[in-house]
Image (spheres, rainbow, N blue to C red):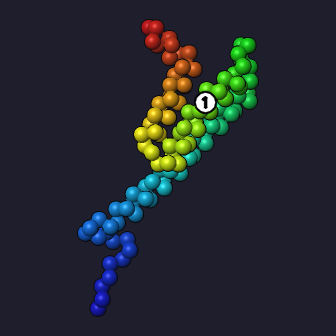
């Protein structure tokens, strides 16, 4: 009898690990694409619902402030570059903190 290992059986050399890593990356990539799409849609919805707020052209502000970090985030995801992804995420998080009036109140307290 010729017993051959099945393709799903890990080899002693760790041959199964790359498949697992690739599967994880594909899964996390789908999750990242989904989350990025949700963020972009949220910005688009806000710009459409509130084009001007208290005489501030909010739609233009959203576009000018959010598009560069979102584009950087998209590029880093496509390039599978974790360092660039973290930097782009920090820019986007900084934008959210800058736009949140409650953050200013907490800092002043």
Q: Quadrant of the C terminus?
A: top left
Residue on which the image places disc 1: 66
**Horizontal side, residue 91 vs residue 4: left or right:** right
In front: 55, or 74? 74
Q: Is residue 96 visible?
A: yes
Give residue 76's position: percent from left, percent from top.
Answer: 50, 43
Q: Is residue 51 above or below residue 84?
A: above
Residue 27 image position (x, y, % from top left):
48, 54
* Count of numbered badges drawn on the protein: 1
Residue 99, percent across and down?
A: 57, 20
Q: Residue at x 51, y 22 (%)?
A: 97
Residue 31 in view, yes or no: no
**Label 1: how many Cα within 10 Å (few below 14, some 14–19, many 20+):** some
Task: Name which quarter of the figure residue 81 lies in.
Answer: top left
The part of the image, by quadrant, that contains residue 72 is top right
Q: Residue at x 44, y 36 (%)?
A: 86
């Amino acid at each position: 009898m010729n017993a051959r290992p099945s393709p799903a059986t890990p080899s002693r050399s760790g041959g199964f690990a790359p498949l697992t890593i690739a599967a994880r990356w594909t899964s996390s990539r789908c999750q990242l694409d989904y989350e990025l799409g949700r963020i972009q849609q949220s910005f688009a919805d806000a710009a459409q619902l509130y084009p001007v707020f208290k005489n501030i052209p909010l739609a233009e502000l959203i576009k000018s402030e959010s598009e560069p970090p979102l584009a950087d985030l998209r590029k880093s995801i496509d390039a599978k570059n974790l360092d660039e992804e973290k930097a782009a995420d920090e820019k986007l998080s900084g934008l959210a903190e800058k736009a949140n009036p409650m953050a200013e109140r907490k800092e002043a307290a």
